[in-house]
Structure formats: C-alpha cells, structure tokens
Image (spheres, rainbow, N blue to C red):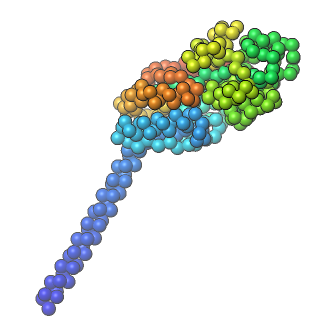
C-alpha cells in the first residue's frame, strides 16, 4: 500500500514537474518570439512588387538582414502614388521596427498637390540616406521626323494643337518634367495621364501620343525595338552608359535638371544612434559590385547622402518643388 502510494505520489510529482516545465518552456517560447519580433523591421514600400523601387528595396532588406542582427522584410502598401505607405509609416512608433523606402514624388510632390496627404515630410520622418536617382529620357514616337530637342520644338511649332504627351500619372515627376519643358520652350502640348509607366509608353509606341519623359529601364525594350527614340536626358549630366544622348540642358534649356530620387527613412523619434546604425550598414552595401549592377539595371545612378546631408537636401527639395509646381501651374486633376 505504501509502495503504491509512493508511486502515485511520484507520478503526481512528475506530472506537476512536467506541467511546470511545459509552462516554463511555453513562457520561454513566447519570450523568444517577442525577442524575434523586436529584432524584425518592416520596410514599407508604396509601390507594387516588381517596380524598380520594390526591386531595390527587396535587395536592401536582404542585405541589411545579413549586416545587422535583425530581420528586414518588405511590406508593399501601394496607393496614391506612394502616399498611403508614407501615411502608414508617419503614424508608426519612433523605433526601427518600421522604415520606408520611398521615391521623391511621394515625399516632396504629393504633399503639395494632394489635400488628402496626411503627413509632413520634414516633421514626420527621420532621413537615413538617399541611395540613387533615375534620370528621365525625353522620348518621341519613332515615326515622327524628330531626332533632337531642336527638331521637336520646330515640329511642335509647325503642328500647333497636334502634340500630346503621356505620363504615368498626374503629379508624377514625368508629368512635371514635361510641364517644365513646355514652359521653357513655350510650346503647347495636351496631357494624357495613364496609370503607370507601362501604359504611358505603350501609348507612345502606338502613336496615340507623340512625346513623354520616362525612366531608362522602362523605356529600354521599346528603344531597342526601334518603336521610340530618345532625344535627351533630364539630368544635368549625361549618363555614362548613355553618353551619346545629350542632356536637355545642353540641348537649349540651360539649368534643366528634373530627376526623381529614392531614399530610406524611419518614423520621427528614432534615436540618432539607431539611425547611424542603419546608415553605417547601408554605406557598406552601397560599395558592393552587386548593388552597383542592380542600380544600373533599373536605369539609375548612385546618389548617396548621409542622414544630415539627406535632411538638408529635403529642406531644400520641399520649397524647390513648391515653387516648381506653383510656376508650372500643375494641379491635381
């Protein structure tokens, strides 16, 4: 009887021990999960998968994960030309759990054009780095007797009311670049906005519109196919890979320099040492041959700024685009 009681007592004790150990293991698992969660960072991107910002952003997330003791992953939040994503990030806590990889249009153009934008770029974000920019090509349908900026201006003047231009959307840098081109040349073009670069370029190749500004990567297949022609590039300097294509500035419009760029930011309130941690890792990534090849692949060029440099750059970009839009007369249609 005593022996049986002893076995029952041991079994009960073992059961309690098992329960205790199970509870302890569960608590430990929960703690580990919490720790893992704290070591994760989402990089919010306001564009669909497959677009160039998304492509570079995914590479950056993977590279940062290898550099730092933290899991970086991309979260696509498309809509309103990138502004829905930035609104999401602006409302996030001031820590490294959330970052954003955003194009300049969402950061410095949309807040000026669209009343529905609910963030202040200079107040709601901590700049980490600008990484690259993407000069735009001035493109025409290849069937037109145009092979330079000068001949475009001449053709447009001799065909009043017959020239229309496409863009990826109202307020896009492509739209604003063409508006500035029109203002400087005193031409009159009709704007035909599309939902993205692909339909805009398709319309140009089909002859539904005659001219547009668009990025190198998106335009390359149609250029190689001979369906469109490049007259000039929107940056102040020629692209090394496209040395034969002159700048708009050297084609008769001095000072023309309209180029979209892409940067990495956190919500406001992130401590400077945490921002520096990300910046230091980014610097190492940008020096790799793999990253350089990727930027060339998306039609970009490295345009790197540190956190202080990026902040100063933003402080200049916001009023610059305010004046640019005011002078151009562009409104959200």
Looking at the image, residue 208 sits to the left or right of residue 261; the answer is right
Q: Quadrant of residue 216?
A: top right
How many numbered marks, from 0 up?
0
The quarter of the picture where residue 284 lies is top left
Residue 193 in sight from this viewpoint: no
Say which quadrant the C terminus sits in: top right
Quarter of the rendering occupied by the N terminus: bottom left
Q: Residue at x 30, y 65 (%)?
A: 23
Q: With respect to residue 144, does 74 lie above or below?
A: below
Residue positioned most to the bottom:
1
* Residue at left offset 26%, top offset 68%: 20
- How far across and down, in percent of the image, does residue 117 sit? 62, 35
Residue 12 image point, x, y percent: 22, 79
Residue 182 vs residue 5: left or right? Answer: right
Res 79 seen here: yes
Query: Which residue corresponds to the image point at 20% horizontal and 76% vertical from the top-left?
Result: 13
Residue drawn at 70 percent across, 17 percent down: 231
Q: Residue furthest left?
A: 2
Q: Left of 172 or right of it: where is 279?
A: left
- Asked if 26 appears above or below 48 in the picture, the reply is below
Q: Quadrant of residue 136?
A: top right
Q: Which of these two is toward me, 330 or 100?
A: 100
Residue 154: x percent and y percent? 81, 11
Question: In the image, residue 82 lies at what x, y percent?
Answer: 60, 36
| Front-lying residue, 243 or 180 | 243
In the image, residue 17 sits, relative to residue 46, either above or below, namely below
């Amino acid at each position: 009887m005593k022996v049986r009681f002893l076995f029952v007592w041991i079994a009960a004790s073992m059961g309690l021990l098992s329960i205790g150990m199970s509870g302890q293991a569960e608590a430990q698992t929960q703690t580990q999960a919490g720790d893992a969660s704290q070591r994760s960072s989402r990089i919010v991107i306001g564009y669909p998968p497959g677009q160039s910002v998304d492509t570079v952003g995914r590479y950056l997330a993977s590279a940062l994960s290898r550099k730092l003791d933290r899991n970086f992953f991309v979260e696509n939040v498309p809509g309103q030309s990138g502004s829905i994503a930035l609104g999401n990030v602006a409302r996030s806590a001031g820590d490294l759990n959330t970052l954003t990889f955003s194009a300049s249009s969402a950061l410095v153009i949309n807040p000026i054009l669209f009343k529905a934008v609910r963030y202040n770029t200079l107040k709601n974000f901590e700049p980490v780095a600008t990484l690259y920019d993407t000069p735009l090509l001035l493109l025409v349908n290849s069937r037109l007797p145009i092979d330079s900026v000068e001949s475009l201006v001449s053709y447009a003047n001799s065909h009043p009311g017959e020239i229309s231009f496409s863009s990826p959307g109202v307020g896009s840098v492509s739209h604003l670049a063409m508006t500035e081109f029109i203002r400087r040349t005193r031409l009159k073009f009709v704007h035909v906005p599309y939902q993205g670069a692909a339909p805009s370029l398709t319309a140009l190749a089909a002859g539904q519109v005659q001219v547009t500004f668009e990025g190198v990567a998106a335009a390359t297949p149609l250029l190689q196919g001979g369906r469109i022609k490049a007259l000039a590039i929107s940056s102040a300097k020629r692209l090394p890979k496209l040395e034969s294509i002159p700048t708009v500035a050297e084609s008769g419009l001095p000072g023309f320099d309209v180029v979209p760029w892409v940067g990495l930011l956190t919500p406001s309130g992130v401590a400077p040492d945490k921002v520096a941690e990300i910046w230091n890792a980014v610097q190492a990534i940008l020096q790799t041959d793999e990253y350089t090849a990727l930027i060339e692949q998306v039609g970009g060029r490295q345009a790197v700024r540190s956190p202080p440099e990026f902040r100063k750059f933003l402080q200049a970009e916001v009023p610059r685009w305010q004046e640019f839009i005011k002078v151009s007369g562009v409104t959200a249609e």
